[in-house]
């Protein structure tokens, strides 16, 4: 039943887009911390179902709508708090927002943002951009994001889906911000205290990856796993701290095999 309702909702919005996997262990640890805080820790929670609306139909991150969404998240104007000119003592970081400025959820206000390693932010942005092009075909679409390897070293807040009060402690060197100040620990202590859109569980994929996704996801649901088109180039970019734009991504189908908790 859930799958039918999910697909009906996706089709009603514009396109039934398979969900997107972010592998949190693959130079996305800080990115996943920000997204998981927005999905499971902040109140109200944003969850993981997003509507890509091409920056309010403009198709441009630097449009008035795109800028307003980034400003609401605290990433504009520049220099922002994540740059050395804005007071950040750590060079090589920039501002990551959730929900993405390319989605209509950003219009709700109260987005969360975090200072993250610039290369990691570029990787996330490139994956999202290629997903929009190849999966959404440049049109409005609704999609789900999921978190692969959510217990990887350096990933703190993705475990909040089962223990929001215990895990959502905003104590990292680069704290999560909301509405111009560090966000606060949620009062709810139990998994059941999360809003329905934030209810999640761990699943095993056919590839062997463990994935955090909506709790009612049916077995055999298809998700897309971004995979570097040229693994040698990806390794070279990582070893040499080079331009992430040199890495191109393909989206490989992966199926939900079993629920783990």
Image (cartoon, rainbow, N blue to C red):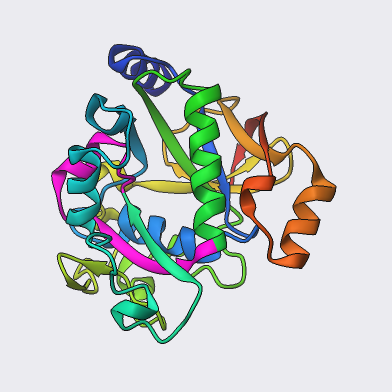
- Residue displayed at 54% across by 43% down: 126
Q: Is residue 202 magenta?
A: no
- Residue displayed at 33% across by 55% down: 97
Residue 29: x and y, percent? 54, 64
Which quarter of the figure is the N terminus placed in?
A: top left
The reply to whether residue 156 is visible in this rendering is yes
In the figure, is residue 240 to the left or right of 70? Answer: right
In the figure, is residue 177 to the left or right of 228? Answer: left
**157 and 122: which one is in front?**
122
Q: Is residue 105 magenta?
A: yes
Residue 69: x and y, percent? 21, 47
Where is 191 relative to 139, above or below? below
Q: Which residues are magenta?
A: 99-118
Using the rendered view, name the quadrant where residue 111 is placed: bottom left
Residue 27: x and y, percent? 62, 61
- Residue displayed at 26% across by 42% down: 196
């Amino acid at each position: 039943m859930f799958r039918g309702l999910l697909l009906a909702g996706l089709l009603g919005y514009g396109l039934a887009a398979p969900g997107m996997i972010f592998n949190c262990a693959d130079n996305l640890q800080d990115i996943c911390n920000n997204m998981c805080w927005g999905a499971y820790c902040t109140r109200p929670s944003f969850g993981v179902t997003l509507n890509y609306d091409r920056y309010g139909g403009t198709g441009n991150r630097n449009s008035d709508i795109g800028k307003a969404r980034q400003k609401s998240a605290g990433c504009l104007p520049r220099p922002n708090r994540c740059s050395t000119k804005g007071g950040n003592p750590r060079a090589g970081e920039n501002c990551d927002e959730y929900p993405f400025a390319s989605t209509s959820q950003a219009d709700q206000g109260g987005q969360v943002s975090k200072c993250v390693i610039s290369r990691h932010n570029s990787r996330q942005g490139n994956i999202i951009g290629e997903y929009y092009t190849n999966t959404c075909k440049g049109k409005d679409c609704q999609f789900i994001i999921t978190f692969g390897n959510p217990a990887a070293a350096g990933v703190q807040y993705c475990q909040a889906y089962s223990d929001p009060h215990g895990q959502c402690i905003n104590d990292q060197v680069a704290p999560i911000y909301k509405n111009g100040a560090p966000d606060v620990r949620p009062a709810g202590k139990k998994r059941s205290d999360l809003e329905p859109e934030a209810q999640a569980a761990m699943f095993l994929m056919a590839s062997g990856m463990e994935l955090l996704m909506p709790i009612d996801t049916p077995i055999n649901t298809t998700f897309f796993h971004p995979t570097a088109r040229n693994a040698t180039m990806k390794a070279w970019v990582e070893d040499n701290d080079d331009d992430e734009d040199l890495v191109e991504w393909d989206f490989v189908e992966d199926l939900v095999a079993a629920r783990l908790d």
